Amino acid sequence: MKKVFFTFVLMLVSDLIYAQATENLGSWEHTRTEADELKDQVASDVFIYTVAGMGDFVCWGFDEFQFRLISTETQFDIEAGYSRFGGSYAGVSINVGIYTNEGQLVEKFKMWLDKEDNRANRFVRTRNAGSMSNPVGQKGKVKKIFKSLKNGSGQKVRIVAPRYNTTDFDITLTPIE
């Protein structure tokens, strides 16, 4: 009887540990929009990684080095400032970590994402204003993220961004299968 009880407790504890370790994992969805000459619309792909209760990571294919984060529960903690070259700006500084499947940190870096207007501070994205106006190193950092997410890379990407008056936006992206 003691062995059965001990085995049951061990199984329960392992399930709790696994649930905590995977609580910020989600799933990928791929949508393809076909070309429409009448609307001057080209064919495009959209990849969305959704984590319930946290939000989404959105990218428009892996050739366009742009992505968006969407916070579902609350808004991002937006910073504002002024650049003498580019005028005012608003957005959020995020932490990005690239991990092996075993959970070992391979590389970490910071990125700047701009707040999207008229989105209640819940949408932030990489700047798409040309190479002279984008933050220094943005394209290279996005390339590293996308390379890790492509099929067969064996790496995960974790993104952490501050949110206003609550826990951080914290998702772990698994490679697309």
Image (cartoon, grey):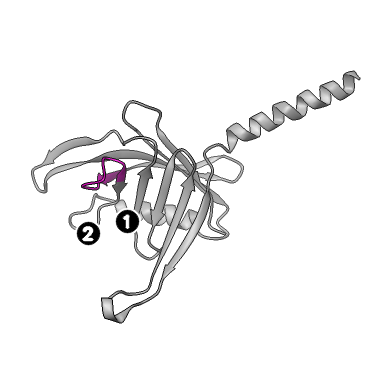
The x and y percentages for residue 173 are 49, 47
How much space separates mark 2 and mark 1, taking CA atoms?
Answer: 9 Å
> Could you tell me how many numbered marks the image carries?
2
Q: Residue furthest bottom?
A: 37
The x and y percentages for residue 144 are 42, 53
- Residue at position x 33%, y 26% in the image: 165
Answer with left or right where residue 84 lies relative to residue 40: left
**Residues packed near mark 1 inside 10 Å, few (<14), some (14 to 19) or many (20 plus):** some
Answer with left or right where residue 96 lies relative to residue 103: left
Position of residue 151 relative to residue 173, above or below, is: below
The x and y percentages for residue 44 are 38, 69
- Residue at position x 40%, y 28% in the image: 167
- Residue behind mark 1: 139
The residue type indicated by label 1 comes to: Lys
- Residue behind mark 2: 131
Q: Which residue lies furthest to the top in this view?
A: 2
Q: Which residue lies furthest to the right in this view?
A: 1
Q: Is residue 126 magenta?
A: no
The boundaries of the magenta stretch are: 112-123
Specify the quadrant of the image occupied by residue 42: bottom left
Answer with left or right where residue 79 lies relative to residue 36: left
Position of residue 43 relative to residue 6, above or below, is: below
- Residue at position x 22%, y 59% in the image: 131
The x and y percentages for residue 99 are 52, 44
Q: Does the magenta stretch include residue 113?
A: yes
Mark 2 vs 1: CB contact within 8 A: yes
The residue type indicated by label 2 comes to: Ser
**Residues packed near mark 2 inside 10 Å, few (<14), some (14 to 19) or many (20 plus):** few
The mark found on residue 29 in the picture is: none
Pointer 2 or 1: first along the chain? 2
**Residue in the foreground of this view, choosing between 115 and 129:** 115
